[in-house]
Image: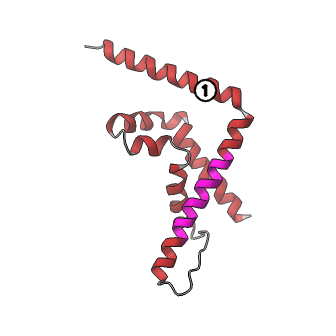
Amino acid sequence: MDILIIIFTVYGISAIITIGKLFEPLRDLAEKHSPNFWKHLTSCMQCLPFWVGILVSLLTETPVKVTCEGCHPLLSTFFTYLFSGAFFSGTTLLIHTIFIRLKRSDWNNFQEQKKQRKTKRVLFNETKF
């Protein structure tokens, strides 16, 4: 049961950052100042949950354990948190895909409105002197 709570926590944090209106200014700032790394990290529902999953695993001390017999303990710890990030990234992407499939028409409308808002913002900024 604990793993389900952690999965939904990682999904919630990632969804709020990547698609939530609250973090839209952060995403716009990331797109403006660092288009290569932060833009993709704050808008990707597969990339961000990897790092959120590692962070939540570190904070809750409940990673998905990987045992590597004969390996150095630090290497085993590294693989444990690497696998935790990958696991949470995959489960979050699965939940998000199901969510989009269930809300298909609403999601398309949301994406179209988002594009229109950005276009208006760009046009407004270009008309300023």
Whether residue 109 is situated above or below residue 59 in the rendered picture: above
- Name the quadrant containing residue 5: bottom right
Residue at the disc numbered 1: 110
Tell me the residue at 53%/25% (across/down): 114
Placement of the N terminus among the 4 image quadrants:
bottom right
x, y percent for residue 129 = 25, 13
The kind of residue on which mark 1 rests is: Phe
- Magenta stretch mostly in which secondary structure? helix
Q: Is residue 103 left or right of residue 44?
A: right
Percent from the top left, x then y, of residue 40? 45, 42
Q: Is residue 122 left or right of residue 105?
A: left
Identify the residue at horizontal 53%, vertical 56% (top origin).
50
Residue 50 colored in magenta in the image: no
- The quadrant holding residue 57 is bottom right
Residue at 58% from the left image edge and 54% from the top image edge: 89
Question: Can you give x and y, in whole percent of width and height, for residue 51 in the image?
Answer: 49, 56
In-front residue for pair 69/81? 69
Q: Is residue 124 above or below residue 80?
A: above
Secondary structure under tag 1 reads helix
Residue positioned most to the bottom: 70
Image coords of residue 120 (percent x, y): 44, 16
Stretch of the chain drawn in magenta: 80-95
